Image (tube, rainbow, N blue to C red):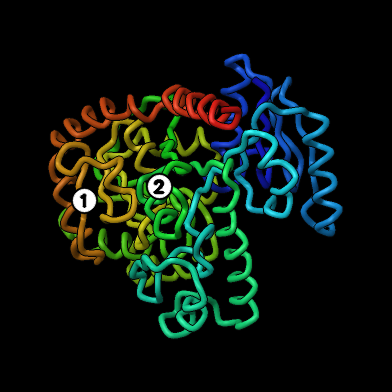
């Protein structure tokens, strides 16, 4: 099968979605598929034997659409899978003549506020529509620029129109995301859940007692300040926190760390190569996932399973799809430093329970390996092609 993937970049970059695309290309290639990638920025960094073509998204829409048509014509795919939102204008050129799937990673596909939460991070289940425009101001779910809100609203409206392409299949990583599409009127038979995966750890290191690891982009909704304050409240344990990742909150979080006097306990090592993140996971006693919004998937949860680590996470979103409370970790219902700190202290004080949960996590990981993901993905690709030609 000749499979063409479309993504914004064709190399490892911040965000689990980009890693998934690169590793999917390499995994399909290893299984004997002829694979290619159309990407929009930067340079490709793919294994030899993987075809690639850049279609620059900074050019006029008509020119970009013509180059996309030419790339598809040159590669001659049997199936196209897109991970990009930059290709909507090109849909008429191929989604009705080539079996196609759009993998959607987050709620910005059907929410002009970006992630369906208000200023208090309360989740919204409203279908996208005109009522969203005033709500951007009254509930704080949008930006401060009226023009910016209008532009984003129009973009989302154009994506919602993808309901009209009868052959286009939508792939999502969680049942939570699937519900969002159903709430926006997408037909059930065109929605398929394909959970993401984590690769098995390459290193095994001794556990560092008291070490909590929370890989995250440093933005407000990831809840890193709440996590720091939660651990600060644990007075009787020699805890330590590492947060691999970077982002716009780094300066403010550094100030919080200094304010609380925990500079010797909290490490913000920045954006790391996956192998370096693996080393932090390997040494962790507990993994934390303090995300304040309802997460579309939460790759950290699956990575914790792969590394055999218990995880403490705020409930909501797709967390329930990879966390088995009491078996592989603890689910925290109240999103406060006190509630999170209590759950973390429970595990940090009980290393034997951490080991037991870690073993259970490794058992559950069998459903989230890369091979399991590729099996599900290929099975759906064959289904998409069969439905298209029926």
Say which residue appears at 45% left-offset and 57% top-offset: 185
**Closer to the observer: label 2 or label 1?**
2
- Residue 12 located left or right of residue 224: right
- Residue 318 located left or right of residue 9: left
Task: Name the quarter where the N terminus is drawn.
Answer: top right
Extreme-top residue of the structure: 32
The part of the image, by quadrant, that contains residue 282 is: top left
Q: At which x and y percent is residue 48? A: 73, 21
Element marked by disc 1:
strand
Please determine whether, in this image, residue 171 is positioned above or below residue 314: above
3D distance between C-alphas at marks 2 and 1: 15 Å
Residue at which label 1 appears? 331
Task: Name the quarter where the C terminus is drawn.
Answer: top right
Element marked by disc 2:
loop
Say which residue appears at 50% left-offset and 65% top-offset: 111
Please determine whether, in this image, residue 388 is positioned above or below residue 118: above
- For residue 297, which numbered disc appears in the image? 2
């Amino acid at each position: 099968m000749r499979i063409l993937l479309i993504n914004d970049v064709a190399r490892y970059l911040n965000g689990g979605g980009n890693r998934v695309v690169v590793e999917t290309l390499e995994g399909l290639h290893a299984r004997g598929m002829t694979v290619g990638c159309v990407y929009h920025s930067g340079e490709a960094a793919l294994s030899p034997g993987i075809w690639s073509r850049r279609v620059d998204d900074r050019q006029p829409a008509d020119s970009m659409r013509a180059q996309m048509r030419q790339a598809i014509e040159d590669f001659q795919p049997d199936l196209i899978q897109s991970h990009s939102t930059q290709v909507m204008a090109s849909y008429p050129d191929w989604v009705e003549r080539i079996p196609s799937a759009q993998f959607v990673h987050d709620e910005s596909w059907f929410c002009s506020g970006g992630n369906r939460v208000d200023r208090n991070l309360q989740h919204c289940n409203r279908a996208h529509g005109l009522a969203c425009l005033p709500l951007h101001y009254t509930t704080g779910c949008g930006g401060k620029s009226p023009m910016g809100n209008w532009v984003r609203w129009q973009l989302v409206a154009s994506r919602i129109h993808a309901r009209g392409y009868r052959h286009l299949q939508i792939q999502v990583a969680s049942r939570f995301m699937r519900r969002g599409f159903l709430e926006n009127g997408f037909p059930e038979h065109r929605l398929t859940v394909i959970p993401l995966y984590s690769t098995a750890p390459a290193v095994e290191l001794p556990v560092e007692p008291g070490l909590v690891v929370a890989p995250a982009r440093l933005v407000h909704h990831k809840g890193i300040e709440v996590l720091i304050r939660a651990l600060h409240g644990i007075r009787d344990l020699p805890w330590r926190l590492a947060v691999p990742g970077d982002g716009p909150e780094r300066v403010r979080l550094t100030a919080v760390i200094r304010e609380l006097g925990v500079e010797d306990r909290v490490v913000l090592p920045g954006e790391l190569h996956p192998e370096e993140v693996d080393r932090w996971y390997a040494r962790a006693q507990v993994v934390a996932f303090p995300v304040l919004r309802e997460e579309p998937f939460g790759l950290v949860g699956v990575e914790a399973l792969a590394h055999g680590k218990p995880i403490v996470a705020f409930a909501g979103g797709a967390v329930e799809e990879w966390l088995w409370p009491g078996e592989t970790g603890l689910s925290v219902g109240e999103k406060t430093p006190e509630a999170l700190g209590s759950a973390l202290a429970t595990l940090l004080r009980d290393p034997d329970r951490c080991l037991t949960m870690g073993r259970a996590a490794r058992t559950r990981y069998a459903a989230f390996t890369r091979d399991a993901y590729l099996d599900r993905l290929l099975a759906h690709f064959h289904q998409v092609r069969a439905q298209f030609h029926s």
